[in-house]
Image (cartoon, coloured by chain):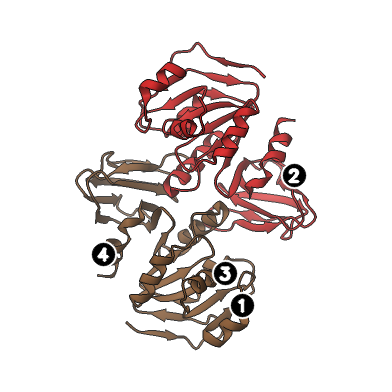
Chain colours: A brown, B red
Amino acid sequence: MQASFGDDNKTALIKTSGVLLIVGGGNVEMGLLKELKNAGTMVIAADGGANACARAKIVPDAIIGDMDSLDGRGDWEQKTRIIEITEQQTTDFEKCLYSSQAPLTIGLGLTGKRLDHTLAALDVMLRYGKERRIVLVDETDLAMLANSAFSFAVSPGDRVSIHPLERVVFTCSKGLKYPLDGLELAPGERSGTSNMATNGRFTIEPAPEEKGAWLLLLDKRHLAPLILKLTR
Amino acid sequence: MQASFGDDNKTALIKTSGVLLIVGGGNVEMGLLKELKNAGTMVIAADGGANACARAKIVPDAIIGDMDSLDGRGDWEQKTRIIEITEQQTTDFEKCLYSSQAPLTIGLGLTGKRLDHTLAALDVMLRYGKERRIVLVDETDLAMLANSAFSFAVSPGDRVSIHPLERVVFTCSKGLKYPLDGLELAPGERSGTSNMATNGRFTIEPAPEEKGAWLLLLDKRHLAPLILKLTR
């Protein structure tokens, strides 16, 4: 795995060929943060997310945001790179995304806790999640944006929730209690939450040429196998 | 305040001229649940939400849902009305809504905790929140659907988040740090989270003829004055 800081002063591009972790200001599971860091994940703190890093005794590779929530900035400046972006058109999460590149990005502390932050993070997912693979993890769930055929294995009986972020038509599914065959889901109209894996492995297939995106929501205990699948 | 059970066997309509509380299966703040019940609020448990009522030593006026999450059904049948609705096209929250009428409905334990439940609840808000006033409360936030001019008072510096559930154009706002004047918000494009009340009182005004709906998200400590405003 290689990590580098770009030379472009405007975008301050941070790149990794491995997994990138973005830590937000919501509830962050300390154990998971430490484990991912120890496993070699590159860590960007989104503004006040650095406070969670401090509690976990982790120095992030960079702190990015408008810096209105960062405690102890002077101390951080001695230890890591601070990228202050003052525009107020985007959230700190989005600033982290447009300043970075990674084949897989995991977000902690961006959903859960405050509903307005959660909704803003999902909006960002919809803008960036089609071009790059992003998985958000909160206290209970993980959420991955998908817009093409996807197959994964959980345990029989595990919940598999499909929430449309845009109108999307599915050709078929395999291994789900409520099949998606020919089903049209749309925000505010029909969603596929609380579906269930019947035998463990499941497949979701959108219609050909379908461009709509949906969130796949699973219990967060599936994070490790999902990372393995997405980095294979 | 009057409450009555409808005679229509199909919809089992529950009506109140006061405040209706729908209790879901997520995290429910026991103190708030008890206080609202003691204040005379009518209580419907959405399926497993009855388990939270049991913990709070409250008997709901009805339990509505597909009953796949209800503990101790036999005991409940002695105490209250159980309305079992088996269709799997809607969530338990939606079953509670289409089975009831109230000028103001408050939802507890429907957002927060599990992200898939939260998203499904917001979808339901979009379907029902234009016709009836609904406020969802979780561990941190309250969320109200709005689609017309709205004015409310918080404290100077308090956050006021506006999250579009549909494309919506605003004519103007008053009392907000980032004015909405002429602004177009849309899911996945631009949202107005983390705005702030400058002087306390704020007003949000959509464009004339605008039909799009947005969520107003505030800290949950504003629930009491919001109820007062909405029941005046």
Q: Mark 3 — residue?
A: A48
Sequence-wise, which precedes: disc 3 or disc 4? 3
Q: Does residue B194 appear left or right of residue A8 in this picture?
A: right
Q: Mark 4 — residue?
A: A229
Dot in front, 1 or 3? 1
Q: Secondary structure at mark 3?
A: loop
Image position, residue B12 (x, y; %): 47, 17
Sequence-wise, which precedes: disc 1 or disc 4? 1
Dot in front, 1 or 4? 1
Rendered image quadrant of residue A1: bottom left
Q: Mark 1 — residue?
A: A72
Image position, residue A149 (x, y; %): 28, 55
Q: Which mark is residue B33?
A: none
Dot in front, 3 or 4? 3
Subunit bearing disc 4: A
Q: CA distance from mark 1 to mark 3?
A: 10 Å
Q: CA distance from mark 3 to mark 4?
A: 30 Å
- Is the residue marked by circle 1 packed among few (<14), some (14-19), or many (20+) residues within 10 Å? few
Contact? badges 3 and 4 (CB < 8 Å): no
Q: Secondary structure at mark 1?
A: loop
Residue A84, relative to residue B17: is it above or below?
A: below
Q: Secondary structure at mark 4?
A: helix
Subunit bearing disc 3: A
